[in-house]
Image (cartoon, rainbow, N blue to C red):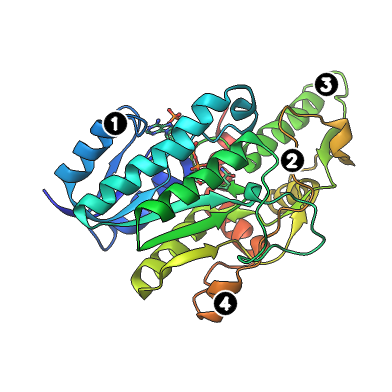
Amino acid sequence: MACDFLVTGCRGQLGRDLMTLFATEHSVRGIDIQDCDITVAPDIHRAITEIRPRVVLHTAAFTDVDGCESDSENAMRVNAEGAGNVAVACRSVGALMVYYSTDYVFDGNKDRPYTESDRTDPQTVYGQSKLQGERAVRAALDEYIILRIAWVYGRHGRNFVKTIIGLGKKQIETVASGGELPDSLKVVDDQVGNPCWTMEIARQTQAVVLSGLRGLFHATSEGETTWYGLARVVFETLGLDVNIVPCTSDEYVRPATRPKCSTLENDRLKTAGLNVMRPWREALESFLHENGRELLSEG
Ligand SMILES: NC(=O)c1ccc[n+]([C@@H]2O[C@H](COP(=O)([O-])OP(=O)(O)OC[C@H]3O[C@@H](n4cnc5c(N)ncnc54)[C@H](OP(=O)(O)O)[C@@H]3O)[C@@H](O)[C@H]2O)c1
């Protein structure tokens, strides 16, 4: 049966919130890898031609940035070819495609936020594969929406905010049980970005889709911080007395080099009067107000 919206990656962190938000006013279906692997072109083609959505919200991706570095073949297959398969299937049923891209398409060396007209130059396999995905979407479709998002967190799945709450809780419990005083929590303080709540991205998606505007957009919460700054606001808002100290990227080496500057300027959304995402701190406080108690009670 035809539906308004189809969400790929519907069990992922963004996919789940898109399903929740769009289901309030539209008919929505979701698929994930258990239902259909986007790298198998005939399978995703069959799924989309059977469901016949008006709009496909394509979140499915290989999102483990370090994992992409050690498995570049799979990164390209899922993030580039998979996105191309979805785009071709959208073309065959006349569906609008929304593709979620990333700040990692830039080199991260700029000292100001990146705009949509800045030159891309990804420094990681993940960034390269997502940029190839953008190109595959543009090549297959006349009409598309590409939303570049960054530093995503939400209620579901794995993300920095949930991880840091877990680590903070563990430190507090160790101290309370009289255990050995744990090391202070070191958090990187020389990378800047715009933290984005999945529910805000979902609302921004809705605003752009319904507006009729098409093309490439940067879509992040206003304002910037570092991972250390983000962790501090999380602990302050939840009233957790955690011993954290800032550290440099050099002290926390990862397989994929993280960009120093990840901030995006929503130039095109602002020009169109469609920039609906709240400043990062306000959005984070809402997220923690709604979900903090539950997150704290999780093991
Ligand atoms: N997370 C971020 O900070 C961030 C930043 C910028 C952009 N983005 C982009 O935003 C989108 C959503 O990110 P997210 O954090 O919500 O991702 P996520 O939680 O990792 O969800 C992605 C979903 O896609 C599924 N998937 C993976 N390979 C697939 C395949 N071959 N066929 C079908 N489904 C497949 C995953 O299943 P499994 O879990 O079983 O693999 C997962 O359910 C992605 O396109 C990502 O690149 C994310």
Left or right of 232 in this view: 125 = left
Q: In this orientation, does residue 154 appear?
A: no
Comparing 178 with 189, the one in front is: 189
Percent position (x, y) of residue 125?
Answer: 62, 34
Amino acid type shown at disc 4:
Lys
User: Residue 178 — which label?
Assistant: 3
Helix or strand or loop: what does disc 4 sit on? helix
User: Residue 258 — which label?
Assistant: 2
Amino acid type shown at disc 1:
Cys
Question: Label 1 vs label 3: CA separation?
Answer: 50 Å
Residue matched to label 1: 36
Q: Nearer the viewer, mark 3 or mark 4?
A: 4
Helix or strand or loop: what does disc 2 sit on? loop
Helix or strand or loop: what does disc 1 sit on? loop
Q: Quadrant of residue 55?
A: bottom left
Image point (43%, 45%), residue name: 59
In primary-sequence order, the first of circles 4 and 2 is 2
Question: Label 3 vs label 2: CA separation?
Answer: 37 Å
User: Residue 270 — which label?
Assistant: 4
